Amino acid sequence: MIAKELVDARWKAIVGGLITLAAAILITYSYVWVQSLSATLDRAPLAPADRAALTASLQNFDLWAWANWFPKNAPLILVPLAAVLGGSLIAGEVSKGTIFLLLSRPLSRDQVLLTKYLVSAGTLGAVAGLGGLGLLLTAATIGHPQPAGGVLLSTLLLWLGMLAILGVATLLSVLFADVLRPVVGAMLVALVAGLPGYVPGWQDWSLATYWASRPAYFGTGFPALEIGVCLVTAVLPAVAALLLFRTRAY
Amino acid sequence: MIDTVAPTDSTRAQAAAERPAIAIHNLVVQYGDRRAVDGLSFTVPAGAIFGFLGLNGAGKTTTIKTLLGFRAPAAGSAQVLGYDIVRDSQAIRARVGYVSETNSLYDQLTIPQIIAFCRATSRRWNGAIVDRYIRTFGLPPRARVGQLSKGMKSQLALSLALGGEPDLLILDEPTNGLDPLARHEVLNTLVREIAAEGKTLFFSSHILTEVEAIADWVAIIRDGRLVVCDELDHLKQTQRVLKLTYDQVPAPAEIAALQALPAVARVEQEGRGVRIVARGDVDALAQQLQGRPGGVRHVDAVNLNLEDLFLEYMKDSSEGQQ
């Protein structure tokens, strides 16, 4: 069954992987380009303090890499991928009628859903890992090697955060018989879960705060709280999906 | 009129009860407030080729899905191969081969990939059987499932179901949409593989001629309720039409008197003739009518095929509902 799930997920994984890798490479090399622009900052109509802050941030590649990858571009790619992977898990089988072949096998419903979920979680992890690896390698090639442990830990957190979206999409996939509603629903949930991050004083209520942890990347502290929050938000919808799938009639 | 399992022949009923492949007792399955299966009870003897008949929406597919654990019953119980359908659903599916009404194969997989999937998710597997049937049906062995015709997909689904060496094969409209040649091949395969090895075949179908060709037992349901369940030969033996020709148009009193006779299920007047649907000891009834005073010129006994029987039962249950 794992092989069949891998065949199902292969195009999503390939497309997601290529986009992720390309984005990671672009972020690294865009730093070189932006730095060349920073020479023109002297002529920009900015307040001296702003000019100084901007110049400082542009001279710190580590900050540039983290800020552009983990809170921004990586979730922009991985959230839709998680929604598409999770949204099609059961709803895809129902809409194509293949659910009857699947359910006629001597497997428990828990086995069916867990296998599907774990393959999708693995795919998501591989794509996130590919992005992290791309970032590490390309950063090294332009002379700004990044902390491997920080990239690894941050990628792990990002992956755990994406598992929450995968879990929601899986839950909606058990609930609905078409793929569109779970995919759109999971993306909306991701949007809502990230919105408090844009409200001053509400950042702690944003899931993005936890999956894109700055201390984890820079090694200034072990992100125990972040891991805990991401784990809980990942497990809850997956368990709900499992319980619902046990009793769902087809 | 609602019959239960073969009430007239104790040995057949006993055989069915002793080793049932499927035993259903007062099964109720609901879709919201609607009862798709409404107090259904019947038994499928082990080794039988059992045709499960009914109009569209009668509850055939729902019954099959419930037997396989796709849906939970609202009330009643059922056992498949001795296992309870609610408690032991996984054990049932380990010993049952199933082909669904719709194409449920993965179009994106190749034939070797879908065989590998079925092998990996089966408790037992006989690859030689699958290979043999793929050759017999002339399926392209490395093709993608999505490239196969509807008939080929049905043949592949059947080959895969047989690969698990099931003790019971449950097929929901197995020849739906197949051309006559493909239908013939599928039916031949079923009879050869299932009947020859003493396994049980439980299948639903709209094509009554094919049911008649291979089934030895039939059950007819309507609106989720059992209309009749019996051995096909017994059903044909004990249900016939008697055509009576009178000297003149029979009086309403005569029609009423005929209706009151034992073994008469229904009486329809057709000019000077009367058509009687008889159930039970039809020969005795025919003799009784032959010597009946009141101008009966002659009595013809007409055997019914399965389609006629089906239509008669559908008429009966419509009248019963009215």
Image (tube, coloured by chain):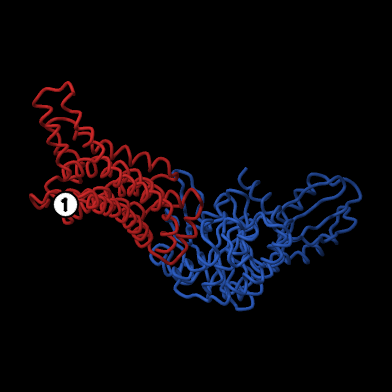
Residue B20 in view, yes or no: no
Position of residue B115 measured from the top left corner of the image (x, y, whole percent) = 52, 68
Task: Choose between B134 and B241: the one closer to the eye.
Answer: B134
Residue B264 sits in quarter: bottom right
Question: Which chain hosts label 1?
Answer: A
Q: Nearer the viewer, residue A128 or B106?
A: A128
Q: Left or right? Give the position of B154 relative to A89.
A: right
Any part of residue B55 in sight: yes
Residue occupying the point 63% across, 65% down: B140
Q: Position of residue B265 (x, y in %)?
A: 70, 55
| A177 lies above or below A199 | below
Q: Is residue A51 left or right of residue B306?
A: left
Q: Could you say where residue B207 lies in the image, as x and y percent from the top left?
A: 69, 57
Q: Nearer the viewer, residue A84 or B62?
A: A84
Q: Residues within 10 Å of mark 1 (few under 14, many from 20)?
A: many
- Residue sitting at x 75%, y 60%: B305
Q: Colour of chain A?
A: red
**Residue in the picture at 77% in, 66% down:** B284
User: Helix, strand, or loop for circle 1?
Assistant: helix
Image quadrant where one finds the N terminus of chain A: bottom left
Q: Is residue B285 left or right of residue A203?
A: right
Q: How many marks?
A: 1
Q: Position of residue A222 (x, y in %)?
A: 10, 53
The amino acid at mark 1 is: Ile
**Chain B appears what colour?**
blue
Tell me which corner region of the image, top left, top right, bottom left or bottom right, holds residue B102: bottom right
Residue beneath disc 1: A227
Residue at the far top in the pictured view: A45
